[in-house]
C-alpha cells in the first residue's frame, strides 16, 4: 500500500477524452444522415422505373423496395440515438475528467 486510501490512477474512466467522445457522436450523426440520403436516392431511382417498366409483376417488384425507406429510417434513428447518448456521456464526464489529479 502506498500510504493513501485512494489511488486516483486506479479509478476507471479518468482517461476518457470528452472531445473524442463528442467526435464519435458527430460521426454517428453524419452516418445517420448519409443512410437517409442514400436510401432516399435509391428509392427515387427505383420509383423512376414505374413508368418504363410494364409487366404483370411490376407492382410487386416496385413494392419490394418499400421496406428500404422504413428500415433505413429506423436504422438512421438508432444511429442518431447512439450519437445523442455519446453526447450525453461526453457532457457527463467532462467535469470529472477535468479535475486536477492529486498524485
Image: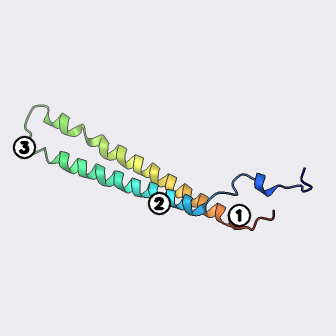
Label 3 to label 2: alpha-carbon separation: 41 Å
> Mark 3: which secondary structure?
loop
Residue 30, x across and y down, in percent: 40, 58
Spatial CA span between label 1 and label 3: 62 Å
Mark 1 and mark 2 lie on one chain; the one further toward the N terminus is: 2
**SS label for mark 2:** helix
Q: Is residue 48 left or right of residue 70?
A: left
Marks 3/2 in contact by CB < 8 Å: the verdict is no
Give how far across and how far down residue 14 sits, in percent.
Answer: 70, 57
Tell me where residue 71 appears, x and y as whole percent: 36, 43
Mark sitting earlier along the chain (1/3): 3
Left or right: 38 as drawn, with respect to 13? left
Q: Which residue is mark 1?
A: 96
Quadrant position of the C terminus in the picture: bottom right
Q: Residue at x 12, y 44 (%)?
A: 50
Please state the horizontal and vertical placement of residue 62, each as a whole percent of the image: 19, 39
Q: Which residue is under mark 2?
A: 26
Amino acid at each position: 500500500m502506498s500510504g493513501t486510501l485512494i489511488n486516483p490512477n486506479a479509478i476507471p474512466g479518468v482517461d476518457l477524452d470528452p472531445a473524442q467522445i463528442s467526435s464519435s457522436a458527430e460521426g454517428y450523426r453524419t452516418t445517420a444522415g448519409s443512410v437517409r440520403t442514400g436510401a432516399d436516392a435509391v428509392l427515387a431511382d427505383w420509383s423512376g422505373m414505374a413508368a418504363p417498366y410494364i409487366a404483370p409483376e411490376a407492382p410487386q417488384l416496385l413494392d419490394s423496395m418499400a421496406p428500404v425507406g422504413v428500415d433505413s429510417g429506423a436504422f438512421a434513428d438508432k444511429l442518431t440515438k447512439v450519437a445523442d447518448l455519446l453526447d450525453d456521456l461526453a457532457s457527463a464526464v467532462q467535469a470529472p475528467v477535468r479535475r486536477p489529479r492529486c498524485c
